[in-house]
Image (cartoon, helix red, strand yellow):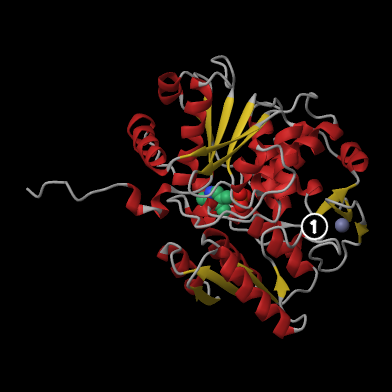
Amino acid sequence: MYLTHLECSRCGRGHPADRPQNLCECGAPLLARYDLAAVAAAVTPERFTLRPADLWRYRELLPVADPRHVTTLGEGWTPLLRTPAYGARIGIPDLIVKDEGLTPTGSFKARGAAVGVSRARELGVERIAMPTNGNAGAAWATYAARAGLGATIAMPLSAPTICRRECLAAGADLRLVDGLIGDAGRHVAELLAESAGGIFDAGTLREPYRLEGKKTMGYEIVEQLGWQVPDVIIYPTGGGVGLIGIHKALHELRELGWVEDRLPRLVAVQSTGCAPIVRAFAAGEDRARPWTDAYTVAFGITVPAPLGDELILTALRDSSGTAVAVDDAEILADLRDFAAVEGLLLCPEGAACLTAARQLRAGGWIRADERVVVLNTGAGLKYPETIDVSAVPLV
Ligand SMILES: *Cc1c(COP(=O)(O)O)cnc(C)c1O
Ligand SMILES: [Zn+2]
């Protein structure tokens, strides 16, 4: 294993990686650091081609030492689909969708859960707990079951019932909260305080390894494009873990010398019903203020106060990217258009990225000749309410 230590994303302080860790004393998330010179000496990009089609193909850049602790359901290596018909409609011929809807548990949260649970198990954790908008809890409950760990999951009452079912099916201790993810977070904080160390806090960015799972989307995009970076990557941003992860992956690949120096411009997409990052980005602020009365059909991005706000804003500025808020009615209209033209049913979060691509192209921020990758972060089938069947005639 090439993992050397953890580094605070704000104060830079180093922390040992050989025991379960949460936030730095300063309150910021920790980032996993590797001996990249040793990785570059041990493996070349060509070698990955010969490996199994899952995210563990990047094992030198992942935090699990013993293969026996790898907890997998075959996550990763999702298709990068060219979508020229829809692309032509919106003036981006080289539009590409990375379809995370094919990931186990129906969302890319499985990447974070696979790596996070595997490492937690390796470090001797016996039970994890987390607040969730639905998909993360479903994924962590599923992988925890597979690893033989306990899982306590706190979820808003308004989260999709499919995610509740997944948690129960996996034998998790599911808590429903009448409120938003922040309220679920307060419930988990109480449980953790009572448990006096018996439960590990696996909340978004509160442990360092979920990010490591999600960063593999960045490696895959680059490898699937023949070790080339696209011009723009558009990401539906809630907690921002995927965006921060892709940014981290791109920097690691640059340091390894496996890609050119240019970074793709990263775009954070939020809903106008919950857009703390867009507001902070537009105001030139380093931190985001909590959003009140958050609501959007794209439940995965309903995060009024993301813990990783600084990291998200840094990734956007460092890559000359931007942040866009799109409206729910447009998200749903684009979701339906796209399904009819390309035959792929996106999740609303993924469709939000299409809306953003369309608007950024119309405003000239994306040029016609640019290669644009959109992340479809979950399976459209998890959101049956996006397609209205009430008008279908009975024959
Ligand atoms: C969680 C989630 C997101 C947001 O992911 P972050 O990395 O936390 O920003 C986007 N889409 C779906 C479907 C999700 O479940
Ligand atoms: Zn710190």
Residue drawn where x is 74% and y is 69% of the image: 121
Residue that protrudes farthest toward the left in the picture = 395
The image position of residue 156, as x and y in percent, is 49, 67
Residue 192 drawn above or below residue 390:
below
Determine the image quadrant of residue 152: bottom right
> Is residue 74 something one can see in this rendering?
no
Q: Residue 128 appears in which quarter of the rendering?
A: bottom right
Q: Nearer the viewer, residue 45 or 132?
A: 132
Q: Secondary structure at mark 1?
A: loop
* Viewer-nearest residue: 73 or 378: 378
Q: Is residue 179 left or right of residue 5?
A: left
Structural crowding at the residue carrying mark 1, measured as other residues with C-alpha within 10 Å and reported as few (<14), some (14–19) or many (≥20): many
**Residue 41 position within the rendered picture, expressed as x and y whole percent measured from the top left:** 91, 37
Residue 361 rendering spot, x and y as whole percentages: 52, 22
Q: Nearer the viewer, residue 64 or 389?
A: 389
Is residue 354 visible to the viewer in this orientation of the structure?
Answer: yes
Point out residue 284 in the picture as x, y percentages from the top left corner: 71, 37
* Identity of the residue furthest to the front in this view: 283
How many discs mark residues in the rendered view? 1
Q: Amino acid at mark 1?
A: Ala
Is the CB–ligand 2 distance for label 1 below 8 Å?
yes
Which residue in the structure is indicated by mark 1? 28
Q: Which residue is drawn at the image coordinates 70% and 25% (left, top)?
A: 228
- Horizontal side, residue 39 vs residue 244: left or right: right
Q: Is residue 371 left or right of residue 252?
A: left
